[in-house]
Structures are given as structure tokens and as C-alpha cells.
Amino acid sequence: MSSSRDIAVEDSAGTDYKTSALSLLAPFLPLLSQLQRLAFLLFFVTTLLFFLLRLAGDPALVLAGNDATPEQLAAIRAQYGLDRPLIVQYFSYMGNLLQLDFGKSLASGEPAMGKVLTMLPATLLIAGLAMLTSVCIAFPLGSWLGFKPDRTERRGVAGIIFVLQGVPGFVTALLLIQVFAVNLRWLPSLGMSYTEIETWVLPAGSLASFLIPSLTRVVAANVAEAMREDYIRTARASGAPGYVLLFRHALPNALLGAAALIGTQFAFLMGGAVITETIFAWPGIGWLLIESVQTLDFPVVQALAFCIAILVFSVNTATDLSFRFIDPRLRSKGA
């Protein structure tokens, strides 16, 4: 019979083992939490989209045409499994989804996910170029506006930016086409090539012109607010020059709000810049989404929604992580 002392030692050893195991798992707990959120998001999006698409119409009518006979429509529905009960289609779809199998495109017969992944790089390219352009312009311009916002010329520029923020993106796209493609004939207005950089300019410029005003205003407001803080007054009293006040003190503290907006804007672009891609015939996922919805190509739309959900979630997660990098207080214990 073991003594109470032996039992206490065993309990202590078991507690230490559990504590060490939890300490080893601690770094992975945030990742597990993020994966859990992603799994719930994908389940919700795919389920909701599955039933909404079935309410949108019958793809057999689109594939067969208006003159199709009932026998032809029945054959098409049987070929793609659309004649089965809706709940049977749903469970079959979810079973295939676990294998990342979205089926074949109803319009072209290609694998749906393969079709999406073929056009995804074009969207990533235009989104990256637009985001890079907007950051390179908005940060210097917003810093200049926020450093001394009460000056007359800076108020005038701020007013122009405020007006530009209300201009729809498609209006800017059409103006760029009219000026640089039709009148000056400097740049092509349609199509895309990975080897011809001139085909990137107008689509990326159109998107950037839509993003720059809002990002500039956020940077300017954050810099102006930081310039009123006590630590700026202390640095100014100690004789620090203006560029040190701006770039070393004010701008780093203004990055947090700007990073949040950048993440939101980039997540929007990851969803596919639908209007811009359609205007410029840019072969990205936004253009593919419009085409697939028009033809009721269920597998492709479902594959697109799955990829877009992962991309948006990834961008939002990266934005959260960037907050910890920008603000040391968020890296402190317990934050």
C-alpha cells in the first residue's frame, strides 16, 4: 500500500508533466484558433453559396439554350447530377470538398479549381501593383499633409483628395482609357501579358487611384494627431529637426491605423477587382466570377468563393500579425 507521500509525489509529477506539455503547445494555440476560425468560415461560405446558387436558376437551361427539348434538359441534368434531390447534392458536394474536388466547369469541362488557379496570378499581380503604388504615393503625401495641416496649400490639396475619394473607380478607369489609350495611344486598353509591362499600367493605375485618397487621408489624420502628442513637443523642445519629428516619431506611431486600412483594401482586391478586370478584359478571378455567374457555372463559382475566402482570411490574419510588429505594446506579455 503506497503512502500518502508517494501519492503526493506522483500527483506533483503528473502536474509538472501537464504543465510542460501545455507550455510546449502554447505557441501553437493561436495557430489552432486561426485554423478553427478558417474552417468555420469555409463551412459557412460554401454551405450558404451552395443553396443560393441553386436558387439562382437552372444551368441546364443555359447550357442547352432556349430551344432545348425537355429530353435534352433532362439528359444534361442527369449528366451533371442536377436531377438528384438537393440534400443529396449537398452532401455529395461537401464530401468532394473535403478532397478539394469542386468538379468540372459546366461551361468548358475543365477542372473548376484548376481554372481558378490559372487566373489567380493575374489578380495577385494587379492587386500587388495597385497596393504598392498606393502605399508609395499615399504615405509621403499623407505625411506631408499631416505634418503641418493648417497651411493653406495643404488644405487645398486635402480638399482635392477629399473630392477624389468620391470618384467611382470605373469613372477613373474610363478616363484613363480615353486619355492614354484612345487620345495619346501610349498604352493598350484591353488584355494582359506577363511579358508586356505596358499592359499592367492602366488597370493597376485605375485601382491605385481608387485606393490612394482614402489611405492618404488616414495617414494624414494619424500624423496630425501624433504631432500633437507630448513626446513630439518634448522632441521639438530638445531641438530635433522637422524630418526627425516626422520620420522618427510621428510616422511610426501613425502606421497602426494605416496598416488596418491597407489590410482592408488588400483583402478587397483579393476578392477580385470585378469592375476593373471587366473594363480592361483582365483575365483575373474577378472577371472569371462575372463570367461564371452569368452562365450559372456552379463548380467554378464555388471554387472561386473557396479561394477568395482563404485569401481574405489570410490577408486579415497577416494584418493582425503586422499590428504586433508595428506596436511593441501588443507583443508584451498578456496583450
Image: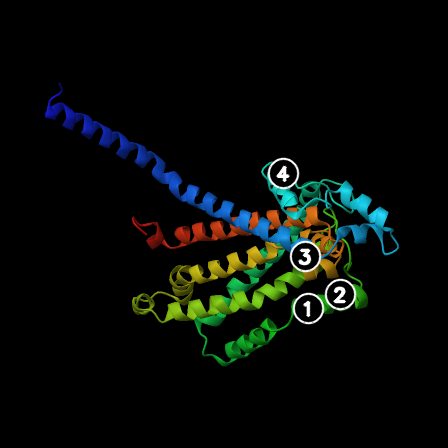
The image's colour scheme reads rainbow
Q: Is residue 325 visible?
A: yes
Q: CA distance from mark 1 to mark 4?
A: 42 Å
Q: Earlier in the sequence, mark 4 or mark 3?
A: 3
Discs 4, 3 touching: Cβ within 8 Å:
no
Q: Earlier in the sequence, mark 3 or mark 1?
A: 3
Closer-to-camera residue (152/81): 81
Q: CA distance from mark 1 to mark 2?
A: 9 Å
Residue type highlighted by circle 4: Asn
Q: CA distance from mark 3 to mark 1?
A: 35 Å
Q: CA distance from mark 4 to mark 3?
A: 21 Å
* Residue name at image x 39 percent, y 39 percent: 28
Please state which of the two labelled residues, at mark 2 or mark 4, is closer to the viewer. 4
Which residue is denoted by mark 2 in the rendering? 177
Element carrying mark 1: helix
Q: CA distance from mark 2 to mark 4?
A: 43 Å
- Residue 57, how many percent across, how many down? 73, 56
Closer-to-camera residue (252/163): 163
Which residue is denoted by mark 1 in the rendering? 172
Q: Earlier in the sequence, mark 2 or mark 4?
A: 4
Q: Is residue 233 above or below residue 41?
A: below
Question: In the picture provided, is 40 more to the left or to the right than 273?
Answer: left
Disc assigned to residue 96: 4
